[in-house]
Amino acid sequence: PKVQVRFPEPPPRPMSALQGFGLGLLLGAFVLTGTWLGFYRPLQQQFTALTDTPDGARLAWLSHPDLTTYARQLTRLADTSPLVVLQQAEQLTDRAQKTWPQDRRQQRETQRWQQLQSIRRENAPVSGSWQQTRHQLQLLADNILTQERNRGSFTLSYLKTAIYQIQHSHNRDVPLEELLRQLSVAVEQGESVSPALIKKTDDRFNALLSQYYALQQAAGLTALPEKNRP
């Protein structure tokens, strides 16, 4: 009988150092790509979104000052609307209402903010006292001119009544410009500024901003959150 002799297969050739190095580079590239896509890219996108806002761009510039972008930062801040804070607050409350719609703490804080804005709008000087005073002065001037042309005269009682009505309309409200003038006088004379004057100025300024923002929303000039859009 024939005897069949089988020799064992030779062991596989070990990987050369060059092949191992190449495989290591390939695996490292995969790991780095996955890490960048999963971690660094989202961070980069968040950073880009942050620097797209005036506040974010300003903070980024302050952490790494760059003279080449200095003028751009100042121009951007100069073009920023004074309503940015109110717009950001509305975005904040809108997100909170969508994220925790049934949470009582969210509802309480959102309502507190909305009530604050409502109070500020109610305190805005929209009574028209300036326009009324202007109208009364114009009427008095027209009457004086008419009487002068007709060689007529005024009674002292008429003049006193007209002046009283004008003063009453004028004193119904103190405009923000007058509060700023009082503050300017105190500073120029080196006097201590009254905390009451500062609070009154802040309150009036916030009231005007809230009223201005509400009017912009009513006119469709300010983007509204999705839930408030018609």
Image (cartoon, rainbow, N blue to C red):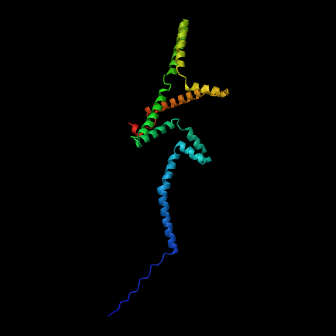
Q: Quadrant of the C terminus?
A: top left
**Number of marks in picture:** 0
Q: What x and y, as percent, mark residue 160?
A: 55, 10
Q: What x and y, as percent, mark residue 68?
A: 61, 47
Identity of the residue furthest to the bottom in this view: 1
Q: What x and y, as percent, mark residue 149?
A: 54, 8
| 153 and 165: which is toward the camera | 165
- Residue at 50% of width from left, 47% of height from top? 49
Q: Is residue 191 above or below residue 5?
A: above
- Residue at 56% of width from left, 41% of height from top? 76
| 119 and 146: which is toward the camera | 119
Q: Is residue 120 above or below residue 104?
A: above
Q: Quadrant of the N terminus?
A: bottom left
Q: Is residue 153 above or below residue 171?
A: above
Q: Is residue 111 above or below residue 34?
A: above
Q: Quadrant of residue 189?
A: top right
127 vs 192, left or right, is: left
Q: Is residue 96 visible?
A: yes
Q: Is residue 154 visible?
A: no
- Residue at 51% of width from left, 49% of height from top? 48
